[in-house]
Image (cartoon, helix red, strand yellow):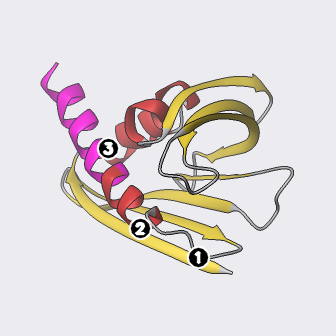
Amino acid sequence: MTTYHAEKRINHDVTDAFAYLADPANLPNYFPRITSARQVGPELVQTTAAVDTDGDGDQEQVSGKAWFHADEAAHEITWGSPEHSEYHGSLKVSPTGGDATLVSLQIDAADDHPGIQDALDEALDSIAQQLAAQSAA
């Protein structure tokens, strides 16, 4: 099992940040490869993503269902594949004082996947940009 981890401090209220991140409809706004997401059942999300599944350098559209659990009390979202239990992840927001929030993102996968660490860093940058835009509105 390979674990990927990234975190970023953002200037945004932890409760508001969690509310935004916990809405599955917002997943395409901050996960770089997800192109659509919608809730299809209790804690079940249908996603479509653009990924290079065969290693040829071209991205293919892949759709699937994932379990998606948002724990409001812990400010943590966990998700995974019902079909591939070795793949799962978590996103946690924690207050760091004032309006600052620490966003921690982790993915566990069965194998090493080039590009996942960069994708986590990109996701955190997107989260910071989305929440900053939300604050400005």
Along the line of sight, which residue is nearer the eye, 94 or 40? 40
Quick one: label 2 or label 3, which is nearer the N terminus?
Answer: 2
Is-magenta flag for residue 76? no
Residue appearing at x 66%, y 69% in the figure: 109
Which residue in the protein does label 1 denote? Answer: 112
Where is residue 41? Give x, y as percent. Answer: 81, 26
Q: Earlier in the sequence, mark 1 or mark 2?
A: 1
Q: What range of the chain is rendered magenta?
A: 123-137
Residue at label 3?
A: 127
Asked if the residues shown at circle 3 and circle 1 are in contact, with their CB atoms under 8 angstroms apart, the answer is: no
Q: Is residue 134 magenta?
A: yes
User: x and y percent of residue 112 in the render?
Assistant: 58, 76
Q: Is residue 100 left or right of residue 44?
A: left
Residue 137 shows up from this direction: yes
Q: Badge 2 is on which residue? A: 117
In the rendered image, residue 88, in percent from the top left (x then y), is placed at 68, 61
